[in-house]
Amino acid sequence: MMKIRKAVVPVAGLGTRFLPATKAIPKEMLTVVDRPTIQYIVEEIVASGIKEVVLVTASGKSAIEDHFDYSYELEIFLAQKGKLDLLQEVRHISDLIEVVSVRQKEPLGLGHAVKVTEPVVCNEPFVVVLGDDMVDAKVPCVFQMLKVFEEFQQSVVAVQKVPLDEAHRYGIIEGKKVAEGVYKVERLIEKPAPGTSKSDLAIIGRYVLRPEIYGCLHKTLPGVGGEIQLTDALDCLRKEQGLYAYEFKGSRYDAGDKMGYLQATVNYALAHPDLGGKFKEYLKKLVADLDD
Ligand code: UTP
């Protein structure tokens, strides 16, 4: 089986849940502590051994490409001022990855965002990592999934348990457990109406996909919300080849949602090497004052 070299990162969504912040700034560029969300995502991809990133972008998203490009004026300025630590930091960001961008001309859904990458990914397996879905884990989530892919040789979706009354907000899988944390998927339902599935295993923003997904995407008609749903194409892949779901180890934050973003900020601030201690003291005092 071929080594996985490419990560597709869709960032072409409109971010309506985070308006007005996202009117002129892509949600993937919103800062969690000291870095934009997208940098955490890219660092996870790099830590998993992948260096080629295919960004699916749209108009108004060029700040993301700039963030991973050299910035000559800034670098010359920092060099002249002798700010070498900062110079190294901004260079490090650009050197993390090789970026290829593909435009999604209309926001026709996540499935469509993956479909437009076909000419650059072609005929090899790849990972998809959503640009606003953060996972904090000892072993990077993408790396965990690559291990499952190596073992089972079929496409893998990341899942986590969610409260049953929230299941209708996710793509849900039903399946048979085949190994610790691994399920063979038997059914996929995008945003199930309450009461239509007993499963609490929700798909989150990490996928390892075999290239046959493109054939399935070509056959997928617009589904829920008029969008081309990746979940529908995954169901086609399941029928044609089989599909596995993996309950990853780690904490996931939906940073494209205001509440998820706040939780991510607190989590990453507490874990920050310089700020963590002071922030913890601050939180403790805040909580004590709230209890009074
Ligand atoms: P979301 O549904 O979280 O993104 O899609 P959104 O549409 O920007 O969010 P809201 O609901 O309006 O707030 C998950 C991921 O898929 C990308 C998004 O950028 C996000 O990273 N996406 C979604 C696309 O690239 N294209 C699309 O047509 C839809």
Image (spheres, rainbow, N blue to C red):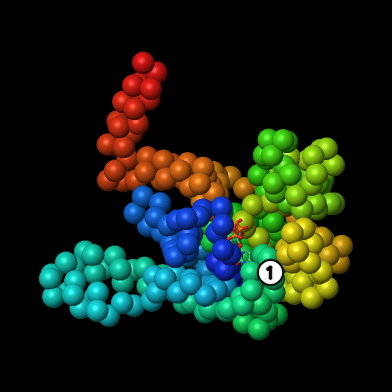
Q: Is residue 97 visible?
A: no
226 left or right of 160 in image: right
118 left or right of 54 in image: right
Q: From the viewer's side, name the closer residue of 41 and 22.
A: 22
Q: Residues within 10 Å of mark 1 (few under 14, many from 20)?
A: some
Which image quadrant is residue 96 in?
A: bottom left
Which image quadrant is residue 77 in?
A: bottom left
Mark 1 within 8 Å of ligand 1, using the beta carbon: yes
Residue that protrudes farthest toward the right in the picture: 239
Q: For the C terminus, which image quadrant?
A: top left
Q: For the N terminus, which image quadrant?
A: bottom right
Residue 281: give x, y in percent of width and height. 29, 30
The residue drawn where x is 24% and y is 74% is 74
| Mark 1 residue type | Leu
Ligand 1 shows up in the quarter that is bottom right
Q: Is residue 252 visible?
A: yes
Residue 235: give x, y in percent of width and height. 82, 60
The residue drawn where x is 24% and y is 69% is 87
Secondary structure at badge 1 equals: loop
278 left or right of 50 in image: left
Residue 114: give x, y in percent of width and height. 66, 71
Q: From the viewer's side, name the closer residue of 241 and 82.
A: 82
Residue 214: give x, y in percent of width and height. 75, 74
Q: In the figure, 131 relative to 68: above or below? A: above
Residue that label 1 marks = 108
Residue that protrudes farthest toward the bottom in the picture: 119
Q: In the figure, 138 relative to 23: above or below? A: above
